[in-house]
Structure formats: C-alpha cells, structure tokens
Image (spheres, rainbow, N blue to C red):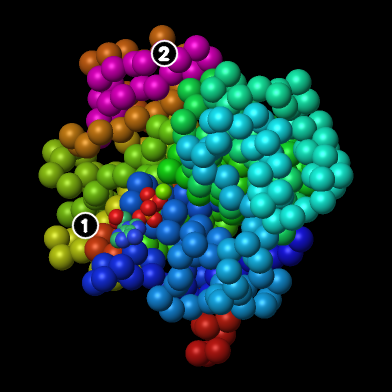
Amino acid sequence: MGSITLRAVSKTFGSTTVLRDINLVIQEGEFVVVVGPSGCGKSTLLRIVAGLERATSGHTLLDDRPIDNMPPYHRNIGMVFQNYALYPHMTVYDNLAFGMSAHKVPKKEIQTRIGQVAELLELQTLLRAKPSTLSGGQRQRVAVGRALVRQPHAFLMDEPLSNLDALLRERMRVELRRLHERLRIPTLYVTHDQTEAMTLADKLAVMRAGEVLQVGTPKTVYQQPATVFVAKFLGSPPMNLVRVESRTRGAMNPVGGAEEAVAMPAWIQEGWEDATDENGTIWCGFRPESVMKRRGPGGLEIPITVEAVETLGPRCHVHGSWGGQPITLTAEDGAMWTRGAVMRVAVPWDQVHWFHGRTERRIEPRPARLETLETGGAG
Ligand code: ADP
Ligand code: MG
C-alpha cells in the first residue's frame, strides 16, 4: 500500500482540454472523493491513474515513483466501475478468479484469496451463482471483490453505486466506508453525487470543467466553499446565493429589490469596491440551516416572503423570497411559517458567505492578527 500523487496533470483530446493542471494526493490509508458534474473529467482522471489513458502533460506517482510509463497491470491498482462488467457466463467464483488465473497465480493461492474476500464481503453462499441471479447490491460486492483479490496497492472507483436504487445505494455507501475502515487501502472515488462525496470522503476535491476548484475535508469545503460553484454544489437544499448591491453606504439590497436595505459588516463595506462586478454587485450566501426565525443578536436580518412549506418528517423546507430572489430555509416546525406572510429571519454573520461579484471567489475578512502586524509595521 502507498500513496498516489497527481502532479500538474493535464489531458487534451484533439483541441479539447479535458483536464487542466490537476494536483491531488491520495495519502496512505486515505479515502479521497472527486466530485463534480457529469462531463467534468472524473473518469478521464481515473483512467490516467489506472494507466488506461496517458496524460498529455504532468505525472502520476505511486509512492513518490513516477509510473507514467508503467503498463496498467504492473500498477496493481484495483478498479471498480459503475457497470460492474462481470462475465455473465461465469460463476461468481470464476469472476473473482479470472484476473488471477490470467496472471498465473497458483490455484491454491487463488482459493485462499477468494475465501478471504468472500468472507469479508459476505459472498460465501454466492460463489456458485451466476451474476444474472444476483441482486444489484450483490453484483456490486462481487465487483469490489474482484478488485480486492488482486491485493491492490490502491482502489479506483468510478461512480460504483450509481446503478443502484436509492435505498441500496445508501446501504452500499456504508458498506464501502466500513470496508475502508478495515482495510485502509488508499482509494480514489469519483462521483457526481454530493451526498456520497460528503459521507464517504476523508478528503474531497470538487471539480468543474476539467479543473479542481477546492480540496479539503468535507467539513472545511462545506463551511468555507472557495467559489460560488462549490457553495451551490454541496448541500441539499443548496446554499442561498443572492446578488446584492449597495445604494447607501453600509447597507445592501438584493439587486432590483424594493425592500428596505439591510446592514452589512464593516469589513465588507470597506472592501466593497474591490469585490463587485461591473454592475456593482457581489454574492451574499447563507445555508438554509443557518437561518433562524427569531431575531438574533445582529447578523444578517432580512424579511422573507413565505411561498410554500414542504414537510419532510422531522423537518421542513420553507421556500420564499427576499427582494424577489428565491430563498430556502430548513426548520423543525412547519406550522410556524405562514404561507403569504412576510417573516423576519436572521443569519449570524459568521454563517454568511461572501463571493466576488465577477470572479465568484470567496471573500474572507482579513485575519485581525495580520492587520495588527501590518499596522504595527507601518507605524
Ligand atoms: P466525467 O467522468 O466527469 O463525466 P469524462 O472524463 O468521461 O467526464 O469526460 C470528460 C470530457 O472528456 C467529456 O467532455 C468527454 O466527452 C471527453 N472525452 C472523454 N474521453 C474522450 C475521448 N477518448 N476522446 C474525446 N473526448 C473524450
Ligand atoms: Mg464518468
């Protein structure tokens, strides 16, 4: 076992750039999830690590050794795909044995390894079955088993759960994570499903159009999204993002809204000119779960026109608008929200996100310590 490093990996097909300067490390024992919409380059990235595709530039390293010229088999990286690709005419046992027989692993050794993997994945009673008689979840386990019997240095998984129905997907997600806790094989898992990404990952990389936008723990990426895209992509319901403008100093409105202006923090006012697009607007964001019904002590205080309340068992989603822009918030008690009413809500300032109006990059207050140092230095 070891680590995998992608160093400045780019890939073009003809004149189309599919991957641009990808840098990513999968440490020993780590479960890394790359998440991004369909077509952003996830499968291409995995195929490069597996050796099925060559990078146009940049390097792949296994334990700090470049493996760009190493053929796929010698990399000994197990792959699990979305469409399992099991041989339909072979039994589960033969499916598991196939890769090893082809590479002349002794029969006895094959038996031992299949025994171990079958026990680990609870496939013992299925070894004589044909794939067509198995459920989706069982087939998925066989596909994982087939990668596992090779005793791989690392795992690559390409949307392995997307063919399963919702309930099974949830169960397999837990199984995969549990398996990882036991074996700690470094894993690079790609998916377009943000829930899978958030729940499985030790480390998350969010991709868009061939680029990695942000890498971090799910918590960090969720709490401090680097761009508007990342902010919207993770979380359900997604973050509320409102374009705001400032008509009077220290106050802001949703663009075009006729509502009274609301106060904004001093540090945003100070940096306002540098943060706007050509129309003088910036992005103000807050997550549905950050919205409080009662007026808190300060924070973003806004009037919301309630339009619909969806009840989902333990909580509900309240849909409404602020200055004509859609807002969703989550609440425990739907009865407290009256359709058609204008209700005052508050979001604590430390849960309000700001993004540049043009670049859509996150804006943070300057750390107080740095400011003091700088002032100190100037004086
Ligand atoms: P994802 O897995 O995130 O959906 P892919 O890596 O499959 O994305 O594809 C990324 C982009 O690269 C897509 O626009 C796809 O059409 C293109 N692409 C993938 N493989 C090839 C290829 N062999 N030739 C040309 N274009 C390709
Ligand atoms: Mg894909």
The mark nearer the N terminus, 2 or 1, is: 1
User: For numbered disc 2, what is the local secondary structure?
Assistant: strand
Which circle, 2 or 1, is nearer the viewer? 2
> Magenta stretch?
304-322
Identify residue type, mark 2: Thr
Residue labelled with disc 2: 311
On the rendered structure, is 87 left or right of 311? right
The residue sitting at the top extreme is: 335
Residue 3 belongs to magenta span: no
Residue 49 position in % (x across, y down): 55, 63
Q: State the predominant SS element of the stretch in magenta.
A: strand
> Is 196 located above or below residue 106 in the figure?
above
**Quadrant housing the N terminus:** bottom right
* Residue 54 or residue 350, whichever sits in front: 54
> Is 376 located above or below residue 70 in the figure?
below
Residue 295 appears in the rendering: no
Residue 314 belongs to magenta span: yes
User: Residue at 46% across / 70% down in the picture?
Assistant: 54
User: For numbered disc 1, what is the local secondary structure?
Assistant: strand
On the rendered structure, is 25 left or right of 313? right
Sort mark 2 into few (<14), some (14-19) or many (20+) by Cα contacts within 10 Å.
some
Residue labelled with disc 1: 281
> Is 377 located above or below residue 23 in the figure?
below
On the rendered structure, is 19 left or right of 81? left
User: Residue at 57% across / 45% down in the picture?
Assistant: 80
* Residue 150 or residue 337, whichever sits in front: 150
Residue 202 position in % (x across, y down): 65, 50
Identify residue type, mark 1: Thr
Residue 236 position in % (x across, y down): 43, 33
